[in-house]
Amino acid sequence: MRTEATTLLVIGGGPGGYVAAIRAGQLGIPTVLVEGDRLGGTCLNVGCIPSKALIQAADEFERARRHAGTSPLGIRAAAPELDLPTLLDWKDGIVARLANGVAALLKKSGVEVLHGRATIVDGKTVDVVDAAGETRRVGCAHLLLATGSQPAALPGLPFGGAVVSSTEALSPPSLPRRLVVVGAGYIGLELGTVYRKLGCEVAIVEALSRVLPAYDPELTRPVASSLRRLGVDLHLSCAVEGWDGGAGVLRVKGADGVAFDLAADRVLVAVGRRPATSGFGLESLRLAMAGSAVRIDAECRTSMRDVWAIGDLTGEPMLAHRAMAQGEMVAEIIGGARRRFAPAAIPAVCYTDPEVVVAGESPDDAAARHGEITSAQFPLAANGRALTLEAADGFVRVVARRGDHRIVGWQAVGRGVAELAAAFAQSLEMGAVLEDVAHTIHAHPTLGEAVQEAALRALGRALHA
Ligand code: FAD
Ligand code: NAD
């Protein structure tokens, strides 16, 4: 068996692991990164990037279809047709380009990449088996676990055949006539909307009483209305009872307790993801756990000395930008810096139509935490740019402490509002007060003006509403 030694060994080449490795390499820390599948992890290969590519394509397709009808913009076009293989090639091309970029960045930083499956021997030793079956043993001073997460399956509805996870739904061999999506969270809504816009009949079955139940009802109401407008069949407060693959029928228990059947050619199960903690010897380290995730402290240290963990493996929020920020920080700490993972906010965006973006505290959370708060929202219907984008549905909301006007949260729903996440997160991280945003000149006409107007309104002096 070949053996080697390094200072930092990273297991997992997703956004957490590859960013940690790049930063460590830049700092001159001898670093080995082990990836068992494809560099870029879930995010790049079967997550954030391919899903956003399909969302863009589905939006374009639907827009073209609207122009083929009676477009209020006066554009007359023929009904569009979809060439699915070309669409998937385009999406895969974007993924490949970014994955090549990650490989080049790792190389430039001097990181040694081992393609193979890692198995933990102990906290300082890992075996890597490559595609040819050869094993290499790597010893390390620091072990960074960044193995990510996997789709959660439902009992009675195992993945296989017509029952798919987001991974298969992102590369469909054909479009189903009737898709049933189980779970109205991020994945269910993003991909359910894609399939609907591409022409499939889509039904969504959700256990709770609202779509995107993690967000406040006012924020998600425009999303539910838009889904209904698109013709998505929403079944809320429902439980899946079983799947008859032969008949292509999903049995569902309705909110009233009465069971009914939904016919489906394909079923997308999107009921959350589980930290990837098994199958590579992690159990042998007997790390302290937080539920199904590896427990970490504010420096991303696990309960074992010099064993670190980041990203989805460490639980919610399972977001790529959180994994990247943790990875960068761990590399810096190993390099000698004093850092803590204590962001003022980790923004989250759901790429529904309209998009939802949140950063910091909701009005309810803020009231519970700070007592006296002020909250104001500005409707996009009063924003000129939103009207020219046909995006009048939605609003921007600010939440601040009443006493000192310190901003503690932002929420927005509307087409194109994802890009406001940067302004939201920056104002929170910099400790802005309402006056800072209200007195900042925002370019006209932009959606960003709604951010300024929300702050003005919270101060009781909105100009345009
Ligand atoms: P991962 O990206 O899961 O990477 C882990 C890597 O470790 C994998 O490449 C895996 O092959 C490798 N690995 C695991 N075990 C071993 C082993 N034993 N040996 C070698 N290698 C191993 N997040 C957002 O912020 N925005 C989005 O828009 C977004 N969209 C998403 C859409 C979908 C459909 C999905 C599924 C997820 C989406 N996410 C999004 C979530 C995001 O993809 C994850 O939060 C992110 O990828 C987590 O990064 P990670 O580095 O922790 O793990
Ligand atoms: P999720 O947690 O967002 O949503 C799961 C949904 O399934 C919830 O609404 C839940 O109530 C519902 N559910 C659970 N059990 C059910 C059951 N038995 N029957 C019916 N409904 C049930 O999870 P997801 O959509 O699978 O996404 C997984 C993770 O991936 C997310 O937590 C997120 O962190 C990440 N992600 C992020 C983005 C983004 O940032 N835009 C996009 C996709 C995925």
Image: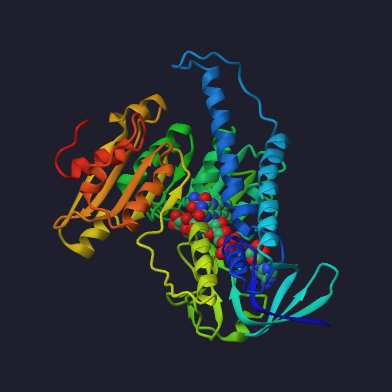
Q: Is residue 373 left or right of residue 199?
A: left
Q: Quadrant of residue 84?
A: top right
Q: Is residue 428 left or right of residue 268?
A: left
Task: Residue 370 in the image: state x and y as whole percent.
Answer: 20, 63
In depth, the one of 383 and 362 nearer the eye is 383
Q: Quadrant of residue 226?
A: top left
> Does the image show residue 425?
yes
Q: Is residue 148 left or right of residue 440?
A: right
Q: Quadrant of residue 157?
A: bottom right
Task: Residue 221 in the image: state x and y as whole percent.
Answer: 35, 42
Query: Which quarter of the frame holds ligand 1?
Result: bottom right
Q: Residue at x 48, y 77 (%)?
A: 295
> Does the image show residue 249?
no
> Can you say whether 198 is above or below 345 in the image?
above
Quadrant, the N terminus: bottom right
Q: Is residue 170 left or right of residue 434?
A: right
Task: Residue 240 in the image: state x and y as whole percent.
Answer: 51, 56
Q: Residue at x 38, y 68 (%)?
A: 342
Q: Residue at x 54, y 76 (%)?
A: 334
Q: Residue at x 24, y 59 (%)?
A: 366
> Can you say whether 304 is above or below 194 in the image?
below
In depth, the one of 70 and 10 nearer the eye is 10
Task: Residue 299 in the image: state x and y as whole percent.
Answer: 46, 75
In depth, the one of 22 and 172 nearer the eye is 22
**What colour scheme was applied to this rendering of the protein?**
rainbow
- How many numbered discs? 0
Quadrant, the C terminus: top left
